């Protein structure tokens, strides 16, 4: 099948490259010329395991190419995916759809008479967007007096950063939201090689499935973090509690890791967008408001633990920050808890030496002035008062803890991701302060 993917950001690039790998012919479109130049040179612009190799192979096989020229893609492909960004309006929490509407305008202007095109919305968009996108394109065609057949479908993505290629190739389900049976059968055929169950529904329900899925996962994280905070009061261990709770098949064990809360490009944005959407319909989403509030408070609570340990006197003390990315296996810093925690320390006069396996260059402009960067965890730890773990990279799980202890000025570790067993840390003689577990 010939497919165009408009937007070569995270979702667009993974989608385009994976469809190409499945044997389709893909044209990736982006208005950013420098991005297109880099992609044409086979450079994978984002850090995602497996993607660079897959991109190179499919460029070589001539299954994927890139252009800034939307017309070229629209002329060549019956199926056009929209995967442009839908950033968050900082004031309202609402999704900002300017890029989606821009593509809609351009599609309306570039479609040729007699064409049949299926527009598929991959971007996360407010409920009703797919329908109004279809209306807008048809309106433009009518104004141009061009007779072309346009149908739109919603087809949300459920890709996690760091495992996006696998998530695309082995999805739990594929959601297709359209009222047009022909479009539904074309998209079903496109996804058939993945062998995943297909949820065929209307566009609005499809858009809602995406929001509800992310909201529920975010809610699990805030819930388990709240339980972790209660565990601290009552002397229970959150990891044992989560394991025991998760064994109930009705609950399941995923997304029950307590820590310093969720970050990234989706959960923070989508939960707030859903609160906004609810408000527009005069529904007060009390649960989601709390999910957002608990998440924001969790990183502050962790910072407070550090401050409390030093009775508020962190001025002049040096801290080794281990991990900056919002989660492991990505260099993404969007909404990373590390930003607030490092800022909080620096604001109080602490000194910070930070290390992250891949996110340092992206983190630099987001971090306050004065942060130093180390080229490995031991460099960061040298002469520091304590190590502070903010991302659960495997590299940290495999740290030589004896060496770490020797390098630190005092053997203190604050762990926002609960990566070490309490007994080990106790045996090694660390003061070890984590989340939802007793201090040792
Ligand atoms: C998420 C969704 O999983 C994906 O389906 C959607 O398309 C985009 O948003 P992503 O943001 O890449 O993906 O990461 P994910 O692995 O889901 O983690 C999100 C955040 O939750 C991270 O900050 C992570 O540290 C945190 N998290 C996750 C927890 O704190 N505890 C958990 O148990 C799981």
Image (tube, rainbow, N blue to C red):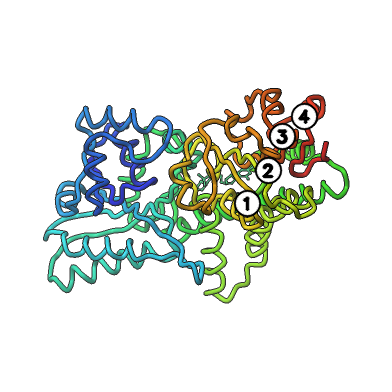
Whether residue 143 is visible to the viewer of this picture, yes or no, is: yes
Viewer-proximal residue among 342 and 421? 342
Q: Earlier in the sequence, mark 4 or mark 3?
A: 3
In terms of secondary structure, where does tag 4 sit?
Answer: helix
Residue pictured at 22% horizontal, 35% vertical: 41
In terms of secondary structure, where does tag 2 sit?
Answer: loop
Residue pictured at 52% horizontal, 58% vertical: 270
Within 10 angstroms of label 1, few (less than 14), some, or many (20 or more) residues? Answer: many
Which mark is on residue 101?
A: none
Q: Decide: marks 4, 3 in contact (CB < 8 A)?
A: no
Within 10 angstroms of label 3, few (less than 14), some, or many (20 or more) residues? Answer: some
Name the residue tied to disc 2.
416
Name the residue tied to disc 1.
341
Q: CA distance from mark 4 to mark 3?
A: 16 Å
In terms of secondary structure, where does tag 1 sit?
Answer: helix
Residue pictured at 28% horizontal, 69% vertical: 136
Residue 71 screen position, x and y as percent? 15, 54
Q: CA distance from mark 1 to mark 2?
A: 11 Å
**As drawn, which residue projects farthest toward the bottom?**
282
Q: CA distance from mark 1 to mark 4?
A: 23 Å
Q: Decide: marks 2, 4 in contact (CB < 8 A)?
A: no
Which mark is on residue 409?
A: 3
Viewer-proximal residue among 303 and 271? 303
Whether residue 182 is visible to the viewer of this picture, yes or no, is: no
Quadrant location of the C terminus in the rendered image:
top right
**Between tags 1 and 2, which lies in front?**
1
Q: Is residue 113 left or right of residue 361?
A: left
Q: Earlier in the sequence, mark 3 or mark 1?
A: 1
Quadrant location of the N terminus in the rendered image:
top left
């Amino acid at each position: 099948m010939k497919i165009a993917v408009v937007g070569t950001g995270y979702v667009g690039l993974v989608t385009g490259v994976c469809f190409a790998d499945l044997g389709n012919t893909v044209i990736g479109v982006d208005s950013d010329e420098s991005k297109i130049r880099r992609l044409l040179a086979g450079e994978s612009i984002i850090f995602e395991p497996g993607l660079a190799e897959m991109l190179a192979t499919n460029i070589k096989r001539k299954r994927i190419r890139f252009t800034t020229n939307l017309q070229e893609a629209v002329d060549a492909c019956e199926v056009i995916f929209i995967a442009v960004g839908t950033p968050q309006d900082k004031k309202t929490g609402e999704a900002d759809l300017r890029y989606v509407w821009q593509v809609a305008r351009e599609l309306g202007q570039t479609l040729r008479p007699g064409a049949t095109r299926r527009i598929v919305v991959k971007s996360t968009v407010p409920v009703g967007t797919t329908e109004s996108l279809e209306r807008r394109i048809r309106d433009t065609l009518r104004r141009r007096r061009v007779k072309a057949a346009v149908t739109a479908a919603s087809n949300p993505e459920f890709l996690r950063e760091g495992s996006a290629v696998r998530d695309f190739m082995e999805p739990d389900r594929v959601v297709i939201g359209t009222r047009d049976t022909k479009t539904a059968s074309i998209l079903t055929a496109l996804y058939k090689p993945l062998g995943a169950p297909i949820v065929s529904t209307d566009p609005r329900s499809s858009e809602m499935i995406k929001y509800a899925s992310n909201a529920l996962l975010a809610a699990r994280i805030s819930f388990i973090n709240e339980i972790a905070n209660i565990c601290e009061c009552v002397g229970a261990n959150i990891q044992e509690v989560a394991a025991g709770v998760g064994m109930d098949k009705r609950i399941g064990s995923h997304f029950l890791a307590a820590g310093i809360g969720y970050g990234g490009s989706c959960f923070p944005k989508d939960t707030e967008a859903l609160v906004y959407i609810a408000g527009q319909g005069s529904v007060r989403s009390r649960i989601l408001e709390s999910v957002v509030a608990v998440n924001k408070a969790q990183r502050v609570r962790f910072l407070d633990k550090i401050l409390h340990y030093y009775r508020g006197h962190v001025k002049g003390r040096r801290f080794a920050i281990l991990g900056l990315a919002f989660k492991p296996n990505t260099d993404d810093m969007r909404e990373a808890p590390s930003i607030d925690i490092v800022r909080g320390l620096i604001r109080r006069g602490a000194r910070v030496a930070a290390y992250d396996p891949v996110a340092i260059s992206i983190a630099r402009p987001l971090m306050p002035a004065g942060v130093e960067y180390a080229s490995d965890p031991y460099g960061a730890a040298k002469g520091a008062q304590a190590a502070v773990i903010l991302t659960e990279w495997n590299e940290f799980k495999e740290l030589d803890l004896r060496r770490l202890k020797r390098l630190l000025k005092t053997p203190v570790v604050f762990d926002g991701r609960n990566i070490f067993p309490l007994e080990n840390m106790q045996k090694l003689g660390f003061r070890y302060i984590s989340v939802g577990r007793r201090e040792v």
